[in-house]
Image (spheres, rainbow, N blue to C red):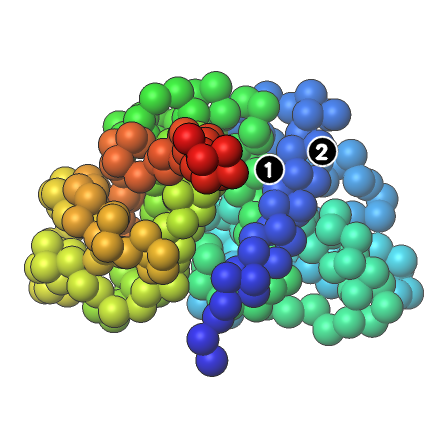
Amino acid sequence: MKRTKLDWQADERCQELAGLLADEITELRQLTAPIDPFAIIRQEHPLLRAGGGNFGDRFDGKLKYNKEKKKFLLFYNIKYDLGLEQGTNHPRTRFSICHELGHFFIDEHHKYLLSGGKAHASSGEFKTAMQMEREADAFASSMLLPTHLVEPLLNNGELTLRKLEKVSEDFGASLLCTTIRGVRLSDLPCAVAGIRRGRIAWMFPSKAMIEGHCYPGKRVLESPSAKDRWTAFEVGDSGRHTEDGILGHWFQLYDREDELYDVEVTQSFFPLRTVDTMVVLLTMDPDAISKEEDEEEDDIDRDHRERFGW
Ligand SMILES: [Zn+2]
């Protein structure tokens, strides 16, 4: 079924709230980068306990409520940590733990588990379509990359892969997670999309894109350079590439189709083998899509002219 603009906006709002909750937690507890999810878990003791294990491909994280012990048990998979220095966790492990913390802290999820709701296995970043999962993902992204700490770094001129990479290393978050956060926090028109099986599997646009009436929702890969990159990715190319493209290949433009279709965009591709996804960061000249500022005034002027016969 085709999703409407309203569906998309409602989903967005829930994710935004989950992110704000994580922001509030990190800010109130005065946590600094890189955020230590275990410090948060310790603060929730004895209601919450956590344990890691190598759960193979079964799940990345799981949160359960144990009725007899009256405790929440958070399990996380350490398979990504194998080979890392003792005591350090891979960004994916950190994300999984924070995702489960989302289920613990988001009121609705917490109550659901308390009332005997079945624990569900979560796996991968941004993989499932379920609303609760997306909320927990949004929570995790904001917990690892709190707004008050990263906004000054990411909403500071054009988003570039270089800038995103530096933040991702300093905060112990994956490049994907950091890119999505960067797009969400940016005041400029930009977006990040995931290409899977040769199609656009998901996309997050910045606020300025929506204000400019450029919406996600396209599934078919129309950009010729993106098709080429996907083909190369499938046969093993793991390089990063930046290429020019056009806006109309990526967005539903509705009333602005004629005006904006050919606007030039910069497409920065980076492959993510672990999730079989080619990620693309889309950036553009902010002036190219901004609505005419004096449009409204023009209308008023016209009204006046007509009314007074000017
Ligand atoms: Zn989950």
Taking depth in this image into account, of 31 and 208 the one nearest to the observer is: 208
> In the rendering, at what x and y percent does residue 5 appear?
50, 62
Q: Does residue 9 appear to the left or right of 287 in the view shown?
A: right
> In the rendering, at what x and y percent does residue 3 appear?
48, 70
Q: Which residue is mark 2?
A: 25
**Secondary-structure class at tag 2:** helix
Badge 2: few (under 14), some or many (20 or more) residues near its Cα, within 10 Å?
some
Picture layout, residue 66 above or below residue 78 = below
Residue drawn at x 28%, y 43% as measured from the top left: 281
Badge 1: few (under 14), some or many (20 or more) residues near its Cα, within 10 Å?
many
Can residue 124 be seen?
yes
Most distant residue in the front direction:
309
Determine contact: label 1, label 2, CB under 8 Å.
yes
Residue drawn at x 71%, y 32% as measured from the top left: 24
Picture layout, residue 127 above or below residue 84 = below
Q: Which residue is mark 1?
A: 143
**Secondary-structure class at tag 1:** helix
Picture layout, residue 154 above or below residue 5 = above
Q: Amino acid at mark 2?
A: Ile
Taking depth in this image into account, of 131 and 165 the one nearest to the observer is: 131
Residue drawn at x 36%, y 34% as measured from the top left: 292
> In the rendering, at what x and y percent does residue 286 appear?
31, 31
Q: Does residue 75 appear to the left or right of 217 in the view shown?
A: right
Can residue 82 be seen?
no
> In the rendering, at what x and y percent does residue 128 appear?
49, 66
Q: Amino acid at mark 1?
A: Met
Splitting the image into 4 quarters, where does residue 16 fall?
A: top right
CA distance separating discs 1 and 2: 8 Å
